[in-house]
Amino acid sequence: MTSTLDVTARRAQTTTRSADAVGPVRIEASGTSSEAVVADIGRLYDGREWQARTTDHAFSYRYSAVGDHDVTLRRSQIGGHIRGAIPRSPDYVVQWITSGEGVPDVTQDRVPLQLDVPMLFPTCREFVFEYEDYDQRLVHMSRRLVHEVADEVFHTGQVTDLGIDHLRTLDPAAITQWRSSLSLLSRELRTGGVDTLLWHTLTRGTAAAFLRMYPPTVTALPPAVLLPRRARLRAAVEYIHEHVAEPLSVSDIAGAAGLSVRATQEAFQRHLDQTPMTYLLRTRLERVRRDLLQADPSGTAVQTIARRWGFAHLGRFSAAYRNEFGEYPRATLRS
């Protein structure tokens, strides 16, 4: 039994996880040991409780990755069975298989892969995968890059969660555009490498193509705050979106924008026709709606999601929700 892991993989482990890292990433790993695959590849994903075994033939594996700190194109091939947990990741990871079978999340989603159909890993949380005798392609994209492009295209602001539904039904036209962007990226990788202006441009195009397949569901920033002369108001609004899950006061919002409390209240009233706290309330209601739409109706209580976003009184919450969206939260959960 043999195992080889290129020394650059150990350097790349740090490179792919640091938002400040720069330079190329190259990983090569291969072998014929079910124990070695856990050590070699499991470490690249901070894997936990990984297990591998043979099927009806000799075990083998090969893993490769090439790119930079923002985008890496990867391939994983295993002749055998493998299962394990992957914790929350700093990357968005789109993957598909060209042969074999696999379930990206056997504990929660339990949706099997279809050949040549992309599926996004649920990297916003821990998940447990299970694959067998497969050939898999993966594209890792840094959250920094994707969120930056999302703000440019969708005006999402500086948020920590885009509210992407990793199980959404993909638009065939968006898949075609995604594949086209990867083809261009692969060509530049072969001919120019990762230090060219074209590579930089194409990685942003790949992130944009990804967001067309998996558009953000967070509320876009109001057009009124996008004007350059309203940069401080935008900073206040972005602060609300970024810290919406935390206790906030008008003073907190004003401090983040470099304004006085009174100036903050006046800016919100003049340009958004609402107070800062009303804007915060409506942003939290949007997060509730997103969670309700993504939740399993058979195993989720409206009150649980409401309390997650700071709504303690179910009656008042339901009234505010209906006033905002024209339906009660239970109707959203069942839709």
Image: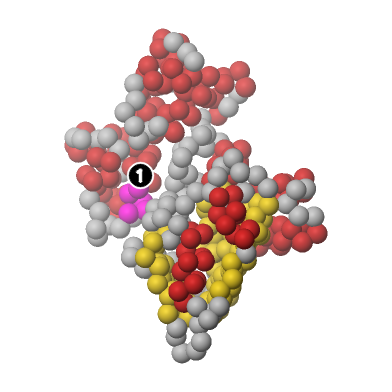
Query: Viewed as shown, does residue 22 lie left or right of 49?
Result: right
Question: What residue do we see at 59% from left, 49% from top?
Answer: 15
Q: How many marks?
A: 1
**Which percent across, then down, holds residue 279?**
39, 27
Question: What residue do we see at 46% from left, 77% from top?
Answer: 34
Query: Does dot 1 land on a helix, a strand or a loop?
Result: helix
Residue 109 lies within the magenta run: no
The type of colouring in the image is secondary structure
**Which percent across, then down, holds residue 16?**
57, 51
Task: Say if 96 sits above or below 281 in the image.
Answer: below
Question: What residue do we see at 72% from left, 61% from top?
Answer: 186
Front in this rendered view, residue 24 or 305: 24
**Which percent across, then down, holds residue 208?**
62, 49
Region of the chain picked out in magenta, as a range: 291-295
Task: Say if 281 sits above or below 79 in the image.
Answer: above
Front in this rendered view, residue 140 or 37: 37
Query: Viewed as shown, does residue 243 lie left or right of 137?
Result: left
Q: Which quadrant does the C terminus fall into?
A: bottom left
**Which percent across, then down, holds residue 59?**
50, 82
Which quadrant would residue 129 be assigned to in this image? bottom left
User: Most prominent secondary structure in the magenta stretch?
Assistant: helix
Question: What residue do we see at 57% from left, 57% from top?
Answer: 10
- Mark 1: give few (<14), some (14-19) or many (20+) Cα within 10 Å: many
The single residue placed furthest to the right in the displayed view is 191
Task: Say if 190 sits above or below 68 in the image.
Answer: below
Task: Say if 220 sits above or below 189 in the image.
Answer: above
Front in this rendered view, residue 135 or 294: 135
The single residue placed furthest to the bottom in the displayed view is 56
Query: Viewed as shown, does residue 332 lie left or right of 15?
Result: left
Q: Is residue 263 visible in this depiction of the protein?
A: yes
The residue beneath circle 1 is 289
